[in-house]
Image (tube, rainbow, N blue to C red):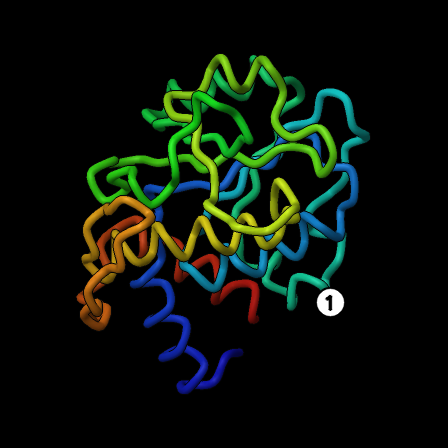
Amino acid sequence: MPTPRRIEKFTRVAALRDLAAAVVLEDIHDPHNAAASFRSCDAFGIQNVHLVFQEEKPFNPRRTGKKTSGHTNKWLDFHIHHGTQQAIAALKAQGFTLIATRVDPAACPLPSLDLAGIPRPAFIFGNEHRGISEEMAQGADHLVYLPMLGLAESFNLSVSVALTLAEYFSQKRLGRSAVPPQHVPAPANAPAEPTALDAPHAALLRRWLKLED
């Protein structure tokens, strides 16, 4: 049974969990890269992770890279899609706005997108070498890129996830407005303390406590 201190910690973390947003990983080749991304999802309060398998071999996210993920895969909710079109249809049926990362002339810099104004954002990341598929690019509502100044064209998968979620966290939780990347944002306010648990967050807390039994 969890101790009172453990229950208090779980209650606070559950109250702060973002149940509206999601991270989508399409055709990830190395499960450990995905596991490193899970750690960022947990750190920034993202509960739902979708994995799309079409070209790559499927893997079980709960059994992969436990050390890499910091064992956070125990606390996340995973949704598996066998095929990109199936994933796009399922996500849009749930009301998600698909925000896909891609090195593309049509993409906009991530900080310029008003993430706080999107009720249900799904942040999509592709294969370590190929990026997102053409199907996913066509199905996305927004194509974005992470501004960078070096010779490399992109960050690795787990860094891309962390930087994207940090931007979302900054806009959604800290109240910073979307700005052109060349502008320096003003200092943000501290995130609000959690309030009483609503029904979905209370249900999440109960599931976590059962895992501790």
Residue at point 37% right, 21% down? 141
Residue 202 seen in the figure: no
- Seen in the picture, residue 27 relative to 39 is either above or below; the reply is above
Along the viewing direction, whichever of 19 and 176 lies nearer the viewer? 176
Does 156 sit left or right of 201 as displayed?
Answer: right
The quarter in which the C terminus is drawn is bottom right
Along the viewing direction, whichever of 43 and 145 lies nearer the viewer? 145
Residue 71 seen in the figure: yes
Give, as a three-letter code, the residue at label 1. Answer: Lys
Give the image location of residue 89, x and y in percent: 47, 15
Which residue lies under the disc numbered 1? 67
Q: How many marks?
A: 1
Residue at point 58% right, 60% down? 39
Give the image location of residue 96, x and y in percent: 36, 28
- Seen in the picture, residue 105 relative to 210 is either above or below; the reply is above
Does 15 sit left or right of 135 as displayed?
Answer: left
Along the viewing direction, whichever of 92 and 207 lies nearer the viewer? 92
- Seen in the picture, residue 151 relative to 138 is either above or below; the reply is below
Residue at point 47% right, 15% down? 139
Secondary element at image label 1: loop
Give the image location of residue 93, x and y in percent: 38, 18
Number of other residues with Cα within 10 Å of mark 1, as a class: few under 14, some 14 to 19, many 20 or more:
few
Residue at point 19% right, 58% down? 175
Quarter of the rendering containing residue 106:
top left
Quarter of the rendering containing residue 97:
top left
Along the viewing direction, whichever of 42 and 33 lies nearer the viewer? 33
Give the image location of residue 68, x and y in percent: 71, 63
